[in-house]
């Protein structure tokens, strides 16, 4: 009985240590990418989200330039009950990955996020704050989608 418990304990320790030391969640750092965006509020926020998502540190070695832009479009939709109107906002992010030395475009495209809904209130301030928070969330979502798309391309290049 003692040996069975000891074997189970050793197997349990091996399983835990095997899962704990895996490199599956290792963040890949792309220090050779320089991100360019226009200088308005939400594009700067988008640039910071891209840097955070790509894990970019300030480095002097620039191999690629990522030119990106984000824009938002809002429209009114009806709620499920049909009595209230909701505001539907989605982001459209365009990007192009360019090799810095040769100015050759490696990849370009645009990404459209899923719409985020906000309710309309009688308060102008609460409507503005709601739209502002939605745009912040959508810029982070667009940065994640661009990261997933460009991560595959950059892994093939390296």
Image (cartoon, rainbow, N blue to C red):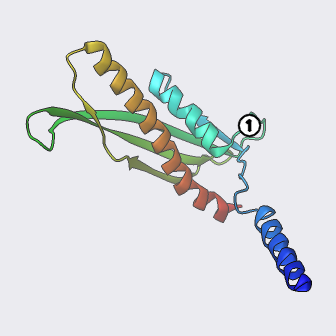
> Residue at horizontal 85%, vertical 79%?
5
Horizontal side of residue 30 vs 138, given as left or right: right
Compared to residue 3, the image places residue 63 above or below, namely above
Asked whether, in this view, residue 114 is left or right of residue 99, the answer is left
In the image, residue 12 above or below residue 139: below
x, y percent for residue 33:
67, 43
On screen, residue 138 versus residue 86, left or right, reads right
The residue under label 1 is 57
Q: Give percent across and percent down for residue 78.
A: 13, 39
Pinpoint residue 21: horizontal percent, then vertical percent.
81, 63
Give 40 or 87, whichever is nearer the viewer: 87
Q: Element type at marker 1?
A: loop
Spot the residue most to the front. 1
Q: Residues within 10 Å of mark 1 (few under 14, many from 20)?
A: some
- Left or right of residue 88, residue 43 in this image: right
Foreground residue, 51 or 83? Answer: 83
Residue at 44% over, 36% down: 137
**Residue 89, above or below 30:** above
User: Residue 46 appears at what percent x and percent y?
Assistant: 51, 33
Q: Residue at x 79, y 67 (%)?
A: 16
Front position in the image: 132 or 59? 132
The answer to whether one can see residue 36 in this image is no
């Amino acid at each position: 009985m003692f040996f069975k418990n000891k074997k189970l304990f050793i197997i349990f320790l091996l399983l835990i240590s095997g899962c704990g030391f895996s490199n599956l969640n290792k963040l890949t750092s792309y220090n050779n990418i320089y991100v360019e965006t226009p200088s308005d509020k939400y594009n700067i926020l988008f640039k910071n989200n891209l840097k955070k998502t790509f894990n970019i540190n300030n480095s002097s070695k620039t191999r690629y330039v990522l030119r990106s832009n984000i824009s938002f479009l809002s429209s009114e939709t009806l709620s499920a009950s049909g009595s209230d109107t909701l505001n539907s906002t989605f982001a459209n992010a365009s990007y192009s990955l360019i090799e810095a030395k040769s100015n050759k475009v490696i990849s370009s495209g645009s990404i459209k996020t899923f719409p985020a809904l906000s309710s309309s209130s009688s308060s102008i301030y609460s409507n503005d704050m709601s739209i502002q928070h939605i745009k912040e969330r959508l810029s982070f979502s667009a940065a994640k989608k661009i990261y997933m798309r460009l991560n595959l391309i950059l892994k093939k290049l390296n």
